Image (cartoon, coloured by chain):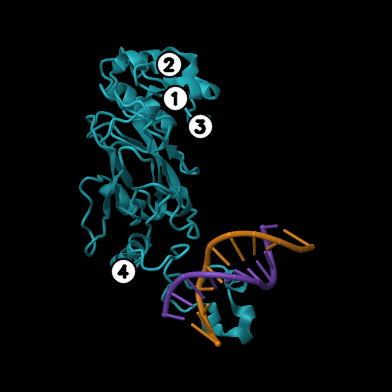
Chain colours: A cyan, B orange, C purple
Amino acid sequence: MAATVLTILSTSPLVLNPSSSASGADLAGKGWKESLSASYSSSTSGNWSWDASDQSVPSTPSPPLSNDPGKSFLLSSQSDDNIEETESTHFLFEDPIPRKRKNSMKVMFKCLWKNCEKVLSTSSGIQRHIRTVHLGRNGDSDYSDGEEDFYYSEIEVNMDTLSEGLSNLTPTSPTTSGPAPFFPVLTCDASRSEPARMIHTPLSQSAPSALCHIRTDHAYQATTPVSIPSMPSDPPHSEDRISVSWQSPPVIYKALPGPMTQIRTVSIGEKRQPVNHTTVSKTHANTTSNAKPTTGTRKPRGEAKKCRKVYGMEKRDLWCTACRWKKACQRFTD
DNA sequence: GGTGCCGGGAG
DNA sequence: CTCCCGGCACC
């Protein structure tokens, strides 16, 4: 069934035609609904397809993935055989700390094939790796149907921490170098019938190192090609369930049904663990408890003295520009 | 009330 | 863009 649908989809121009995404459900028929969002645009590859005849392709492939860290992405999954109403799950990721940017980010390409943690620096390299190693194709062949795009994702790596990060690149067995590393592993359970949203920040904006690993236990069908890395050969699962584990930075997301929900806390650098624990519980309490109908969950105030406090109002010209403009202090960061 | 800073406006 | 400030949440 899946193979048939995928064959249809891969050969039909409708799949690649965003404007016809609304009628994608008709195409698949019998409850299999799959369509592409009109908003899709990728910096890496806009076209993708599945070749159902290729036996090396996992039987229940994950949705097309493209990790475009510069954009937020939206995932909509629809995947039940007998469910008439559209069941979708939206995940929108956004940067937890847009203020902290690093210039030393480098885009790497990570193979998402199960049990393969290959990371290469070029997309062509990772595609060749996937073609030859996983798809069993001739490595010299230039033939590419874009399928390889599915099986790798872009990750941004902070070159400052790359030296230590590369050796720790196996997300499933995070390094224990250093005192009590903080590896929040969050499972995001999405309701079966309600859309769930998750906010995430594009890695490029702040993550000091984005050695991130997202695993999906759900063979979903994406209506939008998205940037969530997944294991292509993961078995299908009845639940929409995504577990996100970050090596760094510690970012916690939780998908909740209903309106856009974000539980986020981040800390970069020194006071990693204590900050996280306190802020996690704090923000979590804010969102879960209905004690006070606060309008927005603001980031807890940092402990560091800022320019205003250090120099005082009279020496305002000594402040950093951000403080002068009443923005987040750039000189005394937390 | 002081402080930090988000959101938004002016130029 | 830069520069500034209202206003809000935190302390």
- What secondary structure is found at the residue carrying circle 4? helix
- The amino acid type of the residue labelled 3 equals Tyr
Mark 1 and mark 4 lie on one chain; the one further toward the N terminus is 1
- What secondary structure is found at the residue carrying circle 2? helix
Residue A217 vs residue A321, the one in the foreground: A217
Above or below, comparing residue A260 to residue A37 in the picture: below
Residue beneath label 3, please? A40
Task: Tell whether label 2 touches label 1 (CB within 8 Å).
Answer: yes
- Disc 3 sits on a residue from what chain? A
Residue beneath label 1, please? A35
Q: Quadrant of the C terminus of chain A?
A: bottom left
Residue beneath label 4, please? A278
Task: Tell whether label 4 touches label 2 (CB within 8 Å).
Answer: no
| Residue A47 is at least partly visible in this image | yes
Residue beneath label 2, please? A27
- The amino acid type of the residue labelled 1 equals Ser
Q: Give the image location of residue A89, x and y in percent.
A: 37, 38
Question: Same subunit under labels 3 and 2?
Answer: yes
Question: Same subunit under labels 2 and 4?
Answer: yes
